[in-house]
Image: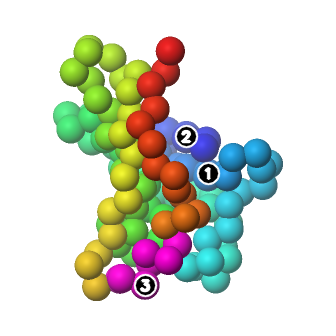
Amino acid sequence: MEISLIQSETVSVNFYRAGEVTPMLRPWLNDSPAIGMQGTLDPEGGSLDIALSENENSFCLNLYFDITDGSYRKVEPSIIRDEEEEFLEQYYSFVEPLESYKKC
């Protein structure tokens, strides 16, 4: 994953699958590459929402940074989607497994 700051709370994200050098293709968007996706930072809430689709907030990868220890070393990923877009569940495997990550 490559993240570039655009404005104070907006980032651009390129997403790569593990072991690959080309951007992941998004079949739910006619196989468009996962480049230039908009991300929104919530510095107070400690999270980053990355839009995986063209509809803002309809299908997102959420990265919640656990700052209880005073750092941003632990992240909890999750998927957020509109309830009406149930068909997107078939694509969860493209961003899974979603596991907690802690930087040593």
Q: Which residue is painted at 58% across and 57% down in the image? A: 36
* Mark closer to the chain start, 1 or 3: 1
For residue 78, side relative to residue 2 (left or right): left
SS at mark 2?
Answer: strand
* Residue closer to the observer: 50 or 67: 67
Q: Which residue is painted at 61% across and 52% down in the image? A: 15
Q: Main secondary structure of the magenta part?
A: helix
* Residue closer to the observer: 66 or 40: 66
Question: How many marks can you see?
Answer: 3
Q: Which mark is residue 14?
A: 1
Task: Measuring from the top left, give residue 66's x and y in whole percent.
Answer: 29, 29
Question: In the rendered view of the protein, which quadrant contains the N terminus?
Answer: top right
Evaluate if marks 1 and 2 touch, with contact meaning CB atoms under 8 Å apart.
Answer: no
Residue type at mark 3: give it.
Phe
Residue type at mark 2: give it.
Ser
Evaluate if marks 3 and 2 touch, with contact meaning CB atoms under 8 Å apart.
Answer: no
